Each structure stands twice: as structure tokens, then as C-alpha cells.
Amino acid sequence: MGKISVRRETARLYYDFMYQGRRCREQTTLLDNKGNRKKLEKHLQQIEAEIQTGTFNYAKHFPNSSYLSTLAELDTEALVAQAAITAPRTPLFAEFVDEWYQENVIQWRQSYRISIRGSVDKYYLPAFGAQGVGDITRADLLKFRSNLAKVPGRSNKEALSNNRINKIMDPLRRIFDEAADRYNFNTPFTRIKPLKVPKSDVQPFSLDEVNLILEKCRSDYRNYYIVRFFTGMRTGEVDGLKWRYVDFNRGLILVRETIVAGEDDYTKNDFSQRDIKMIGPVMEALRRQYRATSNFSEYVFCNREGKPLEHNNVTKRVWYPMLLRLGLEKRRPYQTRHTAATLWLAAGESPEWIARQMGHSTTEMLFKTYSRFVPNLTRNDGSAFEQLLTSTLGAAL
């Protein structure tokens, strides 16, 4: 029960009451007399009534009180304590990511398992492993991504590219989406968009450059590059090609597998499972290769031990030195695939047929990737139509 008291030194009245388990004293400027006491006691009754009903606002009754700052601190502590009680308990990130990996690994290709495991061990665990998965904030993720931009790439000279950073961040996003759904908290990935990635440059070789390469390349790799230039096969597909998938009778290469990190694997996607029509030079190159390797290896292109080619080794020891020797611009071996596509377009082949040969589901990717080559290479300038009208209608024009 509160009361009105007086300070002897000043003869001034003050309030003396309990609030939130603490004794509160609020000084007034009123002198101790019967009228002032009656006035303050009536006010005190109102205060205690509001305290009982939970409607008391300390600042409203005592706006200049020094005790307000203390109350604010107490309120903050209470909110934090309440949040700690009501907030969902979440496991350590290290524990959750291991559980997430085990639950999903069964549906991943071997190459993707290796990639995810590498990102978890190299990037995720050092940054977040000891934190509760629900305690990691958006600011933590932005800082993590910023730090990735400072990590040296494969060459140890340049930082990781935006494309590589996005590939590291994407599985992390899915990890937090699953954790947020499972433990009922808001994912910290809110409003974190992928970094912008420059459009990959298509730099196909001209037919003259192809002829030069095939004429001057090492004889033991000539068949290999004929197949690469004239089939549009991806590096893993041609390096992992086995003799059982070469159908000489029907003139087809059956793309059914690829090779990743030295191991046989499923193709990039279902559409990559395709039959490639062999033109004459490809057929002859594979017949020569059959005589060279079929008696000791299941792989069409292999090393002396019968094992499949290791693409990094071939690129560094054969491909790049050859381009340098021939005075050609340095380009990745993958440009052989782009070269096949542009040569097919130049020959006027059906876009639908080209898309099937490339392993695309539709022609959309074909035109999106090679759009700037289509007008020039397929004479998409009206001249072919004019020639058709002239040859068909003749004098009628």
C-alpha cells in the first residue's frame, strides 16, 4: 500500500509506492499541509488502481522522473528474457547441415555430392558451424558473401567470380529455407539476391581455324578434336565416351554417360541423353580410333593405361600450347561445342535438329546462346527468300 510522505530537510511531500516489485519514490514541490496531502493521496489512489489493472503508465504520471531510464532498461531485459523463453530452440548449424546433407545426398549425382561436401567443409562450417542455425542473421550472410569475394580463385591470383559465389550461396539458401521451415523462424536470406553474372562469351572457331587445328595438332589427338569440333559433345561426354555407345552400323554416337572427377556419371540432365548423327569425317576418325584403342580400353579416348583422358591435363599440355603455337587466340576447349553449333547454323541445318544434337530441350537455348551468329551464318537477311522467288517465278517478276 502506497503512502504520501514528507522529507524533513525540505518539508516537501513525495509519493512512496511499489511498482513491478520495486519501491518508487517521486518528489513533489508541494509543502506538507492538509490540502496538499489530500490532493496527492487522491492521485496516489488513481496510480495504485492503474497498477492493479495493468494500465499504469509511469511516464504519463511522472514525465520528468529520473527513474524512467531504469524502467526502460528493465523493460528491455524483460523482453530479451521473454524472447529467450519463447524463441524456438535450434541446433548448431554444424549439426543441422550434416542432417540436411544426409537427407538429400541420395538424390544427388556424385559430382554434385562432391561439390556440396566441398562447400560445406571449406566455406559453411568455418563461418557458421558453432552458431545456432536460428541465430544466424541476414547481416551474417551478407558478411559471409562479402568475404567470399576476397577468397582467391583456382589461379590464386583473382578472387572468386560472381558466378562461383552464387553457386556457393545457392545451397546455403536451401539449407536455411529448410531450417526455417522445420524450426519455425524467418529465413535470414530475405532480400539477398544473386550477384550479377556477365553473360558467357561465345567464341567459336571459324572453319579455316578448325582446318588449321586439325592439320597441325598432334597426330594422337587429331581424332579426338575431329569428334569435338563436329559433334558438339561436352568435354565430360567425349572424355567419358565408351565403345559400346558408338554405333557404326547406324552411324550414331549414343550419349548416355559423362565423366566427372575421373568417375562415370549420369549426363548433365535427361535431355543430354541423345543420339548424335556422325558425319563422314567423324565416322572415319572413330574407325581409326577403334583400331588404336578398342583392344585395351572400353573408353574411346584414353591414356596409355586405358583410363579416360583427364581434361585439365589435356587442356594445359596439349590444347593451350597448340593454340599458342598456331598463333590463335586462347580459348577454352568448350568452344569446340560452340563451334559445332555455329557451323551447323552456317550450313542451314534445322534449328530443331541442332538443338537435339546439342542436348537442348528446345531451340530457345540455341537462339539465346548463338543469336548474334544466326543472322550472318544463316543469311537471315532476305537474300535467300529473294533467290527462291527469282528461281521459282523467273520472268513473272
Image (tube, helix red, strand yellow):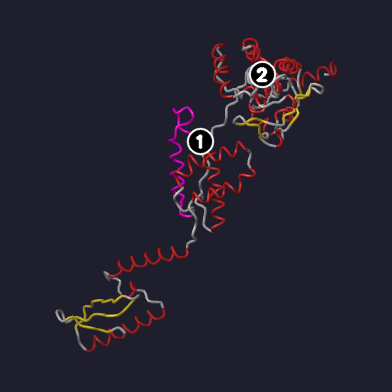
Mark 1 sits on what residue? 162
Magenta segment includes 151: yes
Q: Nearer the viewer, residue 66 or 39?
A: 66
Q: Is residue 370 above or below residue 131?
A: above
Q: Give the residues drawn in magenta, as a range.
A: 134-162
Residue drawn at x 73%, y 18% as measured from the top left:
290
Quadrant of residue 253 in the image? top right
Q: Can you tell which mark lies on residue 67?
A: none
Mark 2 sits on what residue? 224
Classify 10 Å Cα crowding around label 1: few (below 14), some (14-19), many (20 and above). Answer: some
Q: Is residue 196 above or below residue 84?
A: above
Amino acid type for the residue under numbered disc 1: Asn
Q: Is residue 123 above or below residue 319?
A: below
Q: Nearer the viewer, mark 1 or mark 2?
A: 2
Whether residue 306 sits left or right of residue 100 in the image: it is right
- Circle 1/circle 2 CB separation < 8 Å: no
Whether residue 290 sits left or right of residue 107 in the image: it is right
Give residue 275's position: percent from left, percent from top. Answer: 76, 28
Q: CA distance from mark 1 to mark 2?
A: 33 Å
Q: Quadrant of the N terminus?
A: bottom left
Q: Residue furthest top?
A: 216
Classify 10 Å Cα crowding around label 2: few (below 14), some (14-19), many (20 and above). Answer: many
Give residue 265's position: percent from left, percent from top. Answer: 66, 34
Amino acid type for the residue under numbered disc 2: Tyr
